[in-house]
Amino acid sequence: MQITSKKYSKLLSILLLFSMILTIIPPMAASAAEPVSSLAGNGTMNDPYEIGNEAELLFAVGKMNTGDATYSVSKTYALTADIALTSNFPMINSFAGTLDGQGHKITGLVIAANNTTGNVGFIKNATGSALIKDLIIENASVIRNFTSVMRTQDGILVGYMTGTGHISGVQVTGSITESVTGAAGDHDHAVGGIVGSSYTGTANGTVIEDSFFKGTVKLDGTVGFKVAQVGGIVGFTTNTIVRRNIAMGDIYNYVTPNSNATYFNASLIAGLLTNNSPLNSNVAYEGTVHYKWDVLTGRVANKDIGSLYGNTPSPVTGSNNLSSEDIMMQRDEGSDQNPYRITTKPNTDNVVNAAITPKTPSDLREQATYEAMKWNFDTRWQMDAVNGYPVLSFKKDENAYQLFGDGTAADPFQIGNEEDLLFAVEKINDSDSIYSSAKAYILTSDIALTGNFPMIDNFSGVFDGHGHKITGLTIVAGDTGGNAGFIRNAVGSALIKDLIIEGASFNRRFTSVARSQDGILVGYLSQTSHISGVQVTGSITVTVSGAAGDHDHVVGGIVGSAYTTTVDGTTIEDSFFNGTVKIDGDTAFKVAEAGGIVGTTTNSIVRRNIAMGDIYNYATPTATATYFNASLIAGVLTNNSTFDNNVAYKGTIHYKWDVLTEGSTNKDIGSLYANTPAPVKGSNNLASEDIMMQRDEGSDQNPYRITSKSRYDNVVNEYISLKTPAELAQKAAYEAINWDFDTRWKMDAVNGYPVLKFISDSAEHEEPLYTIAAFSDMHIDYGLQDNADTVRQQTRKAMAKIKDEEDPDVVIISGDSISTHGSPIWDDATFDKVTSQMTDAFKQTTKDGKVLYTNGNHDYEVGLTEYNSGAYIDAMMQADVGAYEDVLYEDAVRKTNLIAYHYEIDGIHFIGINTPYNGDGAITDSIYTPESIEWVKNILAGIGQEEQVIVMGHYGLLDSRGLTPDYGLHNSNGMEAELKRILLDHPNLLYIYGHDHGGPEQFIERDTYERVTPYNADGSIEPVRNARSSGFVSSFAGSLSYYNNRFNAGALSAAQPLVVQSLMIYVYADHYELQMKNYGEQTGAVATPRSFKIPFKKLITSSEYTIDRGRSTVTDIAHKTTIGDFIQGFDQANEIKVYDLAGTEITDKGRYVRSDMTVKRIVNGAEGDSLRVLVNKAALNSDGPYPLSTVPSSADTEMVVGADQKDNKIVVYNQNSPDWNDSGSVVWSWKPTTAEGFRNIGKYTNVSDAKLRYSDFYGGYVALTTASGGFVGVIDYETGESLFSRNNVVENNPHSIELLPDGNIAVASSTGNAITLYASSQGDSNGYYSRVSLPGAHGVTWDPKRDVLWAIGDYQVVAYKITGTAEQPVLTLQEDLATDLPFVQGDIGAWGHDLYPVYGNNDLFWVVTGDNVFQFNAATLTVSTDYEGYNDIYSKNMKSIGNQPFSGTIIRAVPNETLNPNWNTEKVEIYRPDGQGGYTKEERTQIRETFYKARVWYYTYQTAAGVAPSVTKVTVSPATIEVQKGETQKFRAIVTAQGGAPESVTWAVYGNQAANTAITNDGTLTIAADETATTLTVTATSAFDGTKVGTGTVTVTDEPVQPIILQRIVQPGNIAELANGTPKTAEALGLPASVTLATYGGGTTTMPAAVHWNVASSSYNPSLASAQTFTVNGAVTLPDGVTNPDDVPLTVTVSVSVKARSSDGSAPTYYTITASAGENGSISPSGTVNVVRGGSQSFTIKANDGYKIAGVTADGQNIGNVSTYSFSNVTASHSISASFVKEEIVITPPDESTDKPTDKPNLDDVKAGAWYNDDVDFVVAHGLMKGTGDHTFSPNAELTRGMIATILGQHYGLDVSKYGENSFDDVDSNKYYAPYVEWVRDVGIAGGIGNNKFDPNAPIIRQDLAVILMRYAGVAGLNLPVVKENTGFKDDADISTYAKDAVKTFFMAGIFTGKPGGKFDPKGVITRAEVAAILHRFIETAIKE
């Protein structure tokens, strides 16, 4: 069937309407287990590893159990679907991470573990901070049998939980049974329905909450037990919180106690509950507790059963537990086997008590019963309507109170007010699974507390005050509760830092004997906890009264006690205390320790702390008292605590006992510490000599200097130096002991002592150099509308307040302040009054009357009359400020109409730009004039980038963040863009504008334009604010407004209080600080926005990259550039940092740079310039496709990709794998994750397309994909990372995707009826796209032959040209290429579905429609079914089809309509050519996946007919070189390839004797210092075709090799008079591909070097009609071996001129010249070359070595065997092609004596029948060898090195005229072998032997001949077959390493056969007869092959 092109009918409108009402039923989700090699996600809380089926779960378990670092036990895992297990579960050995079931269930859990050791459970051991949550395990079965004595802890979910493990929201049903038989002994088993045993040494460490169990728990045995604990929820607990759990079922403790028995228990909740495990709000719903031993009469406290717990702790910790009164107990052994209610047993103290309340079954079926215990029925629980009991719910409460952040160090929970803090404390104290004590918290603002603080019980995380303060901290505590403080106990690795507690009040009173450790911040600091940068003021008092006894109290101003068993475990550093610490009591104490910083320490580091105040130890010691101490730093300092650089600043130590006469080592007071450890660990501690001591009881109550006490060895010693108060008021005293005054400390200017410095303090007290108040839009006429003076009076009052508070140096008025809005009409007297009032007010606000004005658009209006205020402000400024530094008038002569001016005041530059006056009483537009902008540009250029500049105008820029951005500067004359561009180059300026008007809103947050400061008010970095901006700051100046509203004409009056809003600008040496402040008589509180610090930005510059400040981008970056290399491309590399999209610094310098990263310049810790990265070039050194195991390279490795809609992923299979269900058949698979840079990955549903491309733009392989859910992605194929992902697509149902050569992508959307072209080359953040309509758009593919995008829709195949630019591409329909498709029979459309290239023919494309599969011919614009194999592959409703490029195998996907959805298939059909015009069919069936499409996985758009991928030659450069021992040499491989074959190679080195001589993957050879070989061979073997090998010869020298040194680069000539419109390419402009280098050293003076021209960055614009002269810069690449020690710039510059367009002004016309070359040669340039009309184009034709030009054809005419050809004065399109043939071998064997050719002689010594007879005849007849005399061949004589060089050169057909000079000292140029020796050296076949010698007369040994012939095969392009297996030789071990591969290759090719006895004799000298035989076989074999 043949169908020609035609236009479709008017029926299209009907069809379009019909298509719009069609819908596609979305596919239903399904899941199945599958073998996997990786999990989606990265294992973090934000992106957990995803487990969606059994295979993925087993994969995760396997990885965790083998200690895998990636899938470790500490990572986060989440179920994404229900999982049905099918076999015995292997169990997770140990788990310390998070397992989030997300409400999914696991069914089929079976665990059978007999006689195994260790614990048992889904997780055997949950350790560390393990969290298991929101999981259902349904109908589990755990069975374990023992025949030996052991101890185990087993549960269905967890066997043993310890550390701070947490279980929350787990629902388990099923059974667990353990049986013990056989040996007697101390059997010890704990069994639980959920957890076997929960044990931890940390109080309230583990948690089991909100969980459900229903089933059977059974412990059975025939022998006596020592321990048997059985519980429905948990078998045994210690230090475990058990709360809000419910259990029902049968609990069996079916064992009997032996004589050693200790714990024997059973219950529905906890078998054994220790009294340090709280039990709250649990429910024993229903069930029976079964037992064997005599509970009724033999019961003791720890051998009992109960409803909720089985033992009898006294008292029970907890409350509100419920138990059904029908819980039964049944003894199943003995005389009493009747069931009883458990409440009837004699000992009911563990069944009915204060903590357990019995309920009727009906009570327990009421939701209210549980709500009364505070069970959460909003999100966690729900009533089961059928069974009447609660079950778990997994709803999310979107409105629940929560803190921002996730509690990680990178994103801590944020606490911003008292409510946040109290919420966090409540959650921490409740052991919440989210807000746990181990998480990180940060204060985001100061907090004022208003009530008694509840205290944090235990804390092991991070509490970062971030420099904020807590005020109002009040703690009132009594006898109970343990230790006390803001944090009672800091445990683990707790860190508390950068916090201020101001004015704290702590009071605790004891009336009973107790032991406590109390501090204002922390009561007890233990383990490895750390306090750093804490400032505390206030008081702490602990009072004891009443009972006598061993009272033991430790009190500290910051920490009560710091105790740890770890040496140097806890740390208190860089902290400050000022206040009162007091221990008081009316009874004697055993221990009383008081310290200003800490009460007592053990194994603690105490350093760089300062304390002052009053320390009271008002207790008296008992007779047995041990420690009685008080000091300003540490009450008691043990000698294993380190004490460094602390300061006791001032204060008094108060005491009651007789220190002077009764003091002892541990009963004393001191300045820094009170005991006397010997020796003290530490040094450099200081104390004021005025520290006082005062006994407040007894006869001696006078204060003394503490240095005067009799025992002063703890006051003055080698560790403590006394200082005067004056010395301690000097910063130098502290700097001398290494205090950090740069970042941590500062001197309090008022009090004279150090206080802490936080980030916010960097300029807090620093006085600005200059203060400026800026206003605008005062519009002073408004007050006259109601009351003539009211508003102006209020304004003047506000000004006076500004003067009083700020006293600004200058006032700025940014327009519209002495103006009207049109009414009323003022008379002169009124105007004079108004203006004088306001201008006087402005002047009086400043220090000396300096006011700077700019005009606004209303400053030319007064009522309905004209008034030009320009003259007024001109006169005012010159009178009050002085003469201008520079000025611009409209009339420079008359100095009228002020346009712009420049002042320099006290070193600060002020530039004002006025609104132009049009002379008609108004302005024509809100613009600045070109003259003023150019003037500003010149002024700024003169100022530079180092001095402070304020630029003033009236208009914000169009994209400013004002409330009314439409008020911005109009760009009608282009000046907005120009001004912005100019300002961007000056990071030292502010641009201040008005015009927007305002109110009390925080304008500065919205209006700061280009460089919103990265600092908060406290000085901390705020990463969320426009981190990529650069250049100036644009900010709104302030306005007149009335309270709580925007400006409104007529609204201001006496009745409406006003707000005067001023932008205050504070100028510092290195930054500006801005703050919008509100003044006036407003009636309510007006928000004062926070201030912003604007550091002067240091701009980023680069000679390598292009920086566009208008877009804040850095471009001209190559793909696959590492972060490390990228940074080196900037001029300030040591100050450059790179950040990802989340604002996190990227420290891995090996990562690739991606678009949308951010690069910043950081100078001295301050953020400077910031730019968005745009990667937009091919990868550096990209030589085309390279080998990748996941890319097909031959028919054996062809691959197929499936678009799997079941699991929403892409899967690539090895086509020829027989079973695609075998995981080994999967080559590559992918699905998006956020970790890889993809957004909204939930939209990756219903995968609709997947393609592979090799992109020159991206410099590597990329995968493309679309998903109907709304996902479009470009993927780095090797890393899986996002190169572009568009999720909020503008069209519906993305169905197909194609990558364009420029890096952009085209997408077809089926229900959207559109083709969309995205500018993906510009990065993710670029939102540009071009869109055209195409009804039913389903497929797109690029046609490189025609440079068009083909697309298929419902009715046609259409083509689009891509016009515009890469930044803004445009789709343009090519109407002449539209081709109609045949309609589906009986239907009204063709319903085109798929479009894909026919590999092997660059004119053909596969086309799939609703009922057929065609081939579309793009050359003839026809669709046809007349192609080979049509009848075999035809099918209706096909979804995809394609053919493999190597084998021609066809791949198709046809839906299985029985599946759901019915457009998918589980089968991929493979049709292999049968060689007779048909195909044979195979199928690959997938049991886990369902495919929408199955595509050929190949990386090119198309391959032309007859051009299969191949490599024809590999050449190594340099071919020969000398390298000194111990040095390195870089080699380069030049690969001649076609058909898209990869050009990569593998490197090897041969001949080395030293093991450390080696070559790397990039061709870098390192020669070991101990290398003994004199000659090495370097080979580069094609990775695509291993028979193609290039070689290089290295001569190893002992002496340094003289380098070739670059002297200069010869600049190429300029290019002139090119035709207008010449394309903007290096080729079209005639720029040379290479330049000449002038060199010295190394024996050469000149050589060529490649140059890369940066044409893109030149100013040339091909579309301009005018003449242009421009420069083009080129980057020169030095050849291998050339050095540049003098740093000669590797750049060249060429000036190019282009003529003006012809007089008719028409746009230039371009023509194309198509250039192509056959095999074994090249033409340059090649492909499609665009030439402007009238232009010229030259081509160079070159044959490969061993070939010659056969012919060149231009426009179909043979022009001969030319090597160059030019088309001149081009006025039409042309074509040129070249072909090549192998050069004929002309053999002219020389005579030994005459060096002349001889005829074939009769050889007497070659006897008939000799084994070598035929071989000698062959080589002599072909001129490869000759006789040694007239009639002799000398078959047993040796062959020399010179001879073999000659033989090979003659076979090659070498042109000896090219080799006239010799490089070797021992080669005579007159000898026959001389040119051949030079040739083998040059091409790397054979090198010298060292010392510049070749030794041509030396004999060849056998292994060397193999190597030489192997290299020659590579040079000559000869292929060697494999005809037999490598059985090897008996003397293989004697073959040198460098020769092994060559000998093996020639043996397998049948060329080397060896000697008798199976030996090769590698070192033996080879005879002429043997060489003849080898050459004969070698030549014939290679030629045949």
Image: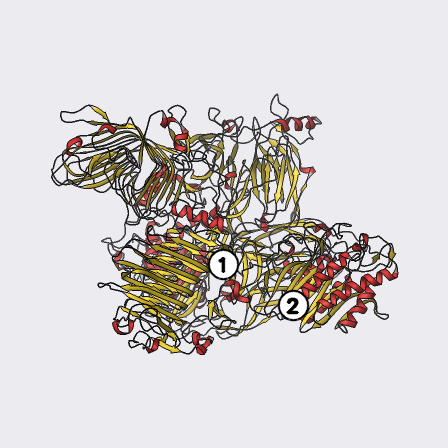
**Furthest residue to the top?**
1386
Q: Amino acid at mark 2?
A: Thr
Q: Nearer the viewer, residue 617 or 1799?
A: 617
Residue at the spot of label 1? 468
Quadrant location of residue 257? top left
Tell me if mark 1 has few (under 14), some (14-19) or many (20+) residues whose alpha carbon lies within 10 angstroms of its own.
many
**Residue 291 appears at what percent x and percent y?**
19, 30
Q: Which mark is residue 1328?
A: none
Does any portion of residue 221 appear in the rendered image? yes
Label 1 sits on a secondary structure element that is loop
What residue is rendered at 62% in x and 62% in y? 1074
Residue 563: tell me if it is visible: no
- Earlier residue among tags 1 and 2: 1
Question: Which residue in the structure is indicated by mark 2?
Answer: 771
Query: Which percent across, then down, holds residue 1791?
Result: 41, 65
Residue type at numbered disc 1: His
